[in-house]
Image: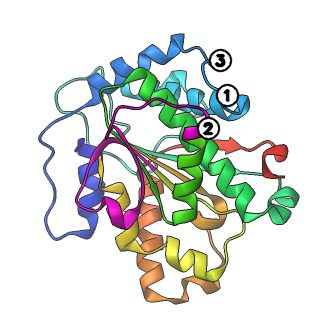
Amino acid sequence: LNADLGNFISTIYDQRFSSEKSHTRETALWLASLSNYDSNCYTLEPSVLANARHFLMAVLQVFSGKSEHAPLFRGPETDLPCEPRTTTHHLASLTLIKLKADIYKAKFSTYEAQVQLEAEFAVSLVTLLQNCAPQCSIFVVTPHRFQRETVKRRMQAIALNVLPGSVMVETVERLQGSEADFVICLFSSLHPSPSDLNFLLERRRLNVAISRTKMLCIILSSEQVLNPTAHILANEEVIKGYDFLKAYERRSWTWEFLADSKLLQ
């Protein structure tokens, strides 16, 4: 684990984790190749693919110690551990993409449309990461089986060629005990029900998803999950999960994605 990942995960354990290896330099080198990426290679939604690429280029700027060149990338609110071996590469292993949408469109969008949008962003990220770091492993973590199947179908539809075992799309439970270089966690909802939030805000599930990461964790979430109504937080277990997710948010580099309304129709 990079030090910022280990520091965060250890917040719910009695003992602090000690980072044995840093991946900042390698990650920066791999992401740098995206500057020459041909966006016409795959039939992905152009606005989503472009946003995913801009996000990863912003991650590159932070890893390279040039966060001032990524003004749309909001830095952590909490002080993070320093990169011990270099002053030219910084830690940015915890990232958060906030999905935003027009309130009216979000209110009347279907669950299926939201999942498809989430899947489009996830597959765009997988495509870009595979392009710049084909030797690395990627997990796409989904709370629900429907999300998992939607992501898999989208990958098949664009004929994304992946090496056997290099990309896994699975529910949280099936990934327990495994790890990957890049982990993409799909924890968004534009109008979640109380039962949805109780499920998403389970601390064990969040911890398992995030702690699969070796280099870069990307959580895709939404304002409705990150700041639910007060009555949702009446359950003690939900409060634990909520506090854990908010602690992640405070430590993360945050990117906002305003979805085109046509993508939610």
Question: Dot 1, how many residues are within 10 Å of its Cα: few (below 14), some (14-19), or many (20+)?
Answer: few
SS assignment at label 2: helix
Which amino acid, by three-letter code, is at mark 1?
Thr
Where on the picture, by quarter, is residue 187? bottom right
Nearer-N-terminus badge (2/3): 3
On the question of residue 255 being in view, the answer is no
Question: Dot 3, how many residues are within 10 Å of its Cα: few (below 14), some (14-19), or many (20+)?
Answer: few
On the question of residue 251 being in view, the answer is yes
Nearer-N-terminus badge (1/2): 1
Q: Which residue lies under the disc numbered 2?
A: 157
Gap between marks 1 and 3 measured at Cα:
7 Å
Question: Dot 2, how many residues are within 10 Å of its Cα: few (below 14), some (14-19), or many (20+)?
Answer: few
Label for residue 43? 1
Residue at 24%, 41% in the rendered image: 2
- Of residues 6 and 158, which is closer to you in this image? 158
Gap between marks 2 and 3 measured at Cα:
15 Å
Is residue 240 on the magenta stretch? no
Pointer 2 with pointer 3, Cβ within 8 A: no
Q: Which residues are magenta?
A: 156-184
Which amino acid, by three-letter code, is at mark 3?
Asn
Which colour scheme appears in the figure?
A: rainbow
Q: Which residue lies under the disc numbered 3?
A: 40
Please state, as top left, top right, bottom left or bottom right, where the N terminus lies in the image.
top left
Asked if 18 appears above or below 172 in the picture, the reply is: above
